[in-house]
């Protein structure tokens, strides 16, 4: 679904003018033109979502909330993440997980520029730091028989762990990200999976992909797109062989919060909460490390890296 295409030439023209006004900082005028476009095509969910952005930026929060509610009404799967925006604006409670279609679309659209934006602009460093954390406990020469890279994206962590992996498999919700990872020819297997679902529905297990098959399961900068982590820890416990390792990162929330939804539409988690989930799912914590995981608008984003081991 193209955010700027309604199917009507006149509506698209007005939406285009609205976008240009927005880019120059004239948000109220952009909202007025976008409203005119929606008077022509009232069933355009993406148009309502864009109107909400202009209304929010012009300071008309109630109007933004109304536009977001209309977007959800027209698009119940919420491919644009309007429900997350409603929570950020204080109109609803934060969803325990984001809509899977929203996350899938977000990264399908982002795949082509993902690495350049993340590494060059945001100074993203989780893959290197997570590898260093693992190596601090097992050494740089340790060989894992099978590594599962959850939310593998384009393969940034996979590239780094490849020399220590006998078999390397990656799973992601975005088919476009998986295509980028496949181009690198570093994975022995790649698959489509949804980490917000129960293990049997996630896409991670089959006759060819049994339970307890991996001696390292990694989730590098993945949990920021999940609020409630219960499902992903159940998946990790189901995947990891006894004595195997679990390595992951979170964006850090305050100690009193299990998780919070940030204005970035990413989730942050309490380290104590994440550590508690590890323990309750059969893992003992080996090491944690607080670090800057990326920059956002020039401001460092604090995160925590974890390495745990599954009890025999």
Image (spheres, rainbow, N blue to C red):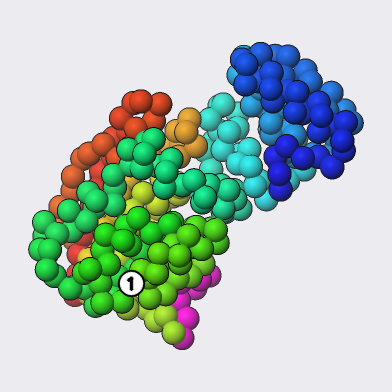
SS type, badge 1: strand
Q: Residue at x 58, y 48 (%)?
A: 109
Vertical side of 278 occupied by 214: above or below = below
The span shown in magenta is: 197-207
- Coordinates of residue 121 in the picture (x, y in percent): 39, 35
- Image quadrant assignment for residue 214: bottom left
Q: Is residue 226 left or right of residue 5?
A: left
Mark 1 closeness class: few <14, some 14–19, many ≥20 residues within 10 Å: many
Q: Nearer the viewer, residue 181 or 99?
A: 181
**Residue 198 drawn in magenta:** yes
Residue 252 is at least partly visible in this image: no
Q: Nearer the viewer, residue 155 or 46?
A: 155
**Residue 307 drawn in magenta:** no
- Coordinates of residue 243 in the picture (x, y in percent): 19, 73
Q: Nearer the viewer, residue 86 or 12?
A: 12
Q: Residue at x 42, y 37 (%)?
A: 260
Q: Is residue 138 left or right of residue 306?
A: left
- Coordinates of residue 303 in the picture (x, y in percent): 28, 40
- Image quadrant assignment for residue 139: bottom left
Q: Taken as a whole, is the magenta stretch helix, strand or loop? A: loop
């Amino acid at each position: 679904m193209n955010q700027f295409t309604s199917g009507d030439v006149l509506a698209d023209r007005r939406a285009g003018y609205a976008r240009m006004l927005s880019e120059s900082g004239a948000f109220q005028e952009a909202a007025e033109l976008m409203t005119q476009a929606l008077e022509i095509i009232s069933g355009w969910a993406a148009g309502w979502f864009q109107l909400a952005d202009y209304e929010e930026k012009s300071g008309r929060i109630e109007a933004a909330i109304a536009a977001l509610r209309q977007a959800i009404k027209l698009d119940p799967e919420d491919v644009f993440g309007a429900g997350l925006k409603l929570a950020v604006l204080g109109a609803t409670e934060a969803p325990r997980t984001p809509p899977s279609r929203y996350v899938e679309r977000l990264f399908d659209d982002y795949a082509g520029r993902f690495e350049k934006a993340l590494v060059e602009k945001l100074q993203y460093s989780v893959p290197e730091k997570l590898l260093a954390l693992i190596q601090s406990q097992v050494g740089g020469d340790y060989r894992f028989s099978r590594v599962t890279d959850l939310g593998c994206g384009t393969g940034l962590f996979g590239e780094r762990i490849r020399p220590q992996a006998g078999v390397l498999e990656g799973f992601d919700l975005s088919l476009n990200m998986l295509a980028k990872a496949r181009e690198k020819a570093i994975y022995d297997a790649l698959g489509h999976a949804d980490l917000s679902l129960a293990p049997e529905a996630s896409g991670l297990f089959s006759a060819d992909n049994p339970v307890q098959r991996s001696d390292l399961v990694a989730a590098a900068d993945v949990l920021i797109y999940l609020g409630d982590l219960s499902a992903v820890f159940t998946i990790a416990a189901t995947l990891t062989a006894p004595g195997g390792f679990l390595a992951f990162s979170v964006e850090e929330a305050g100690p009193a919060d299990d998780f919070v939804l940030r204005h970035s539409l990413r989730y942050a988690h309490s380290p104590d909460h994440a550590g508690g989930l590890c323990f309750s799912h059969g893992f003992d914590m080996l090491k944690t490390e607080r670090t800057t995981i990326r920059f956002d608008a020039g401001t460092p984003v604090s995160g925590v890296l974890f390495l745990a081991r599954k009890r025999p």
